[in-house]
Image (cartoon, rainbow, N blue to C red):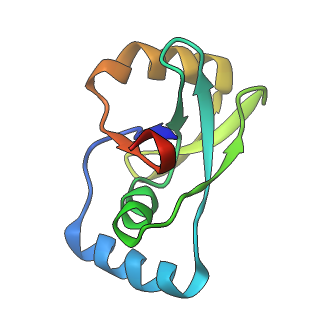
């Protein structure tokens, strides 16, 4: 499974904190949109959780929101409600510059 992160930036200290929590809770659930073009998941959240899962040898559980009408995502720390169809187009257009994390058989 391949997962494209919505953004590349992350905080090392927060990543360490997420790893500690994930060791207790297990694999994270991540909302994502399927890209038919690139045949991979585009995560709309969880950049730290996805990195932590990879480092800990866990595979995230994908919650497919591809067919949802809207989704609430964070943009610059603010919760923003967006149309999933518009978000999917934007993410597909920007996928060439995304950070891709590979899990399982695709490694």
- Residue 56: percent from the left, percent from the top? 40, 72
User: Would residue 65 appear left or right of 22 to someone viewing this image?
Assistant: right
Q: Relative to 63, does residue 26 appear above or below in the rendering? A: below
Q: Residue placed at 31% from the left, 31% from the top?
A: 98
Q: Quadrant of the C terminus?
A: top left
Q: Residue placed at 34% from the left, 67% from the top?
A: 55
Can I make out residue 81 in this image?
A: no
Nearest to the observer: residue 5 or residue 84: 5
Q: Check the image and name the residue furthest to the right.
A: 68
User: Would residue 17 appear left or right of 83 to someone viewing this image?
Assistant: left
Q: Relative to 88, does residue 51 appear above or below in the rendering? A: below
Q: Check the image and name the residue furthest to the front.
A: 105
- Residue 19: percent from the left, percent from the top? 39, 77
The image quarter containing residue 84 is top right
The image quarter containing residue 14 is bottom left
- Residue 101: percent from the left, percent from the top? 37, 44
Can I make out residue 5 in this image?
A: yes
Nearest to the observer: residue 51 or residue 1: 1
Q: Relative to 95, does residue 44 appear above or below in the rendering? A: below
Nearest to the observer: residue 64 or residue 72: 64
Q: Relative to 14, does residue 36 appear above or below in the rendering? A: above
Q: Residue placed at 55% from the left, 88% from the top?
A: 24
Q: Residue placed at 49% from the left, 44% from the top?
A: 105
User: Would residue 76 appear left or right of 33 to someone viewing this image?
Assistant: left
- Residue 88: percent from the left, percent from the top? 57, 21
The image quarter containing residue 69 is top right
Query: How many marks are shown on the rendered structure?
Result: 0
């Amino acid at each position: 499974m391949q997962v494209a992160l919505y953004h590349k930036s992350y905080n090392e200290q927060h990543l360490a904190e997420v790893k500690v929590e994930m060791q207790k809770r297990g694999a994270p659930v991540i909302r994502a949109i399927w890209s038919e073009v690139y045949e991979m998941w585009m995560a709309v959240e969880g950049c730290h959780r996805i990195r932590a899962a990879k480092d800990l040898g866990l595979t995230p559980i994908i919650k497919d929101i591809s067919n949802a009408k809207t989704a609430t995502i964070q943009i610059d720390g603010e919760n923003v409600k967006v149309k999933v169809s518009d978000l999917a187009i934007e993410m597909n257009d920007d996928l060439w510059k995304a950070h891709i994390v590979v899990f399982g058989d695709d490694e």
